[in-house]
Image: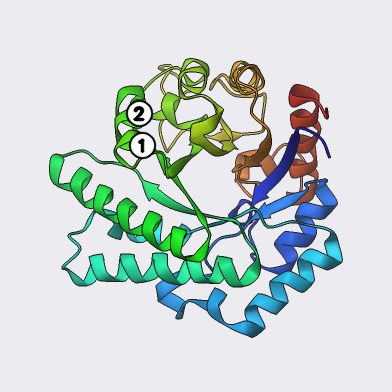
Amino acid sequence: MGRFKFAVCEWSFPCWGELAIKMAYEAGFDGVQLGDGGGSMHAYPLRDRRVQEYYLQAGSDYHISFPQIHLYTLGHQCYYRSRLDTLEGQTCLESIKQGVIAASEMGVPSVIIDGMRMNNAAKRQHIFQVAQYAVRIGEEYGIQIGMETDMSMEDHISFLDALDGKLKLCFDAHNPVMYGTGYPPDMIRTLGKDRIDHFHVKESQANEDGFLSVETPIVLLGEGCTFFRESAQAVKDIGYEGWIVSENFYFRPNILAKGYDYVSAAKRDVETIHAIYGTD
């Protein structure tokens, strides 16, 4: 097995489930980072045995691994930043527990939580308490907890150190550029491999004023201005081995307008990832 394995997020395709897994296989990915199937909004479908068997059978049929479950719906609900004694806070904790148990039942080693937009002391404290809970539940069920965040370099380290290194990062090399929190290659080298669970990769183009935002277009890897190649070199420099996960969006109109379909766009990214990271 090579030093790196390449996966894609389930929500990178317009349809989740078996079709997304099949598309990932056809594009040439090794794995799929699963979403949570709707989480609390759909009564935690990944806890249902039939749903679990459906995913595991699709993974077997298409030779696709499931290295992580990302609590995608929970992130969009924004409940991570709620007080734990509120309904939203309790839903957040229950979503994490159900996600961790589902991962343990499905043989998925890692569950990813959100640590975005901690823009005041209260939200930071709420997310820290959530992370403490997630780490505790993860240890109980033998699941590594990862966190995706938009923090600065200094805040990354202080947050992780406060949790005794038990929380690791889903480090999205695109986020520091979009949120203006640092230069991704330097951050990767400073963090080092031991703080990283896996990497997310995607790219954006700047607008006419040279800025990135959530509105600026997502583009295929190597076509943006988020230091994709420089970040890949930093990943190699720190001696990291493991999963590189595309969080590109292969159904975006600006990508399809260039003549791609969902699979051919993803395949182009697979070719780029292999060319930049190598297959050693």
Q: Amino acid at mark 2?
A: Ile
Residue labelled with disc 2: 157
- Asked whether the beta carbons under mark 2 and mark 1 sit within 8 Å of each other, the answer is yes
What residue lies at 64% left-to-right and 65% top-to-bottom?
Answer: 16
Quadrant placement of the C terminus: top right
Which colour style is shown?
rainbow
Q: Is residue 176 above or below residue 101?
A: above
In the rendered view, does 18 fall on the left or right side of 120? right
Residue 41 lies, in percent from the top left, at 41, 75
**Residue toward you, 166 or 71:** 166
Quadrant placement of the N terminus: top right
Where residue 211 sits, quadrant-wise, is top left
What residue lies at 14% left-to-right and 40% top-to-bottom?
Answer: 121
Q: Can residue 144 be spotted in the picture? A: yes
What residue lies at 55% left-to-right and 61% top-to-bottom?
Answer: 35
Describe the element under mark 1 as helix, strand or loop. Answer: helix
Residue 77 lies, in percent from the top left, at 34, 61
**Residue toward you, 51 or 223:** 51
Residue 141 lies, in percent from the top left, at 50, 65
Q: Amino acid at mark 1?
A: Leu
Would you call the spot at circle 2 few (<14 residues within 10 Å), some (14-19), or many (20 or more)? some
Q: Is residue 75 above or below residue 234?
A: below
Describe the element under mark 2 as helix, strand or loop. Answer: helix
Residue labelled with disc 1: 160
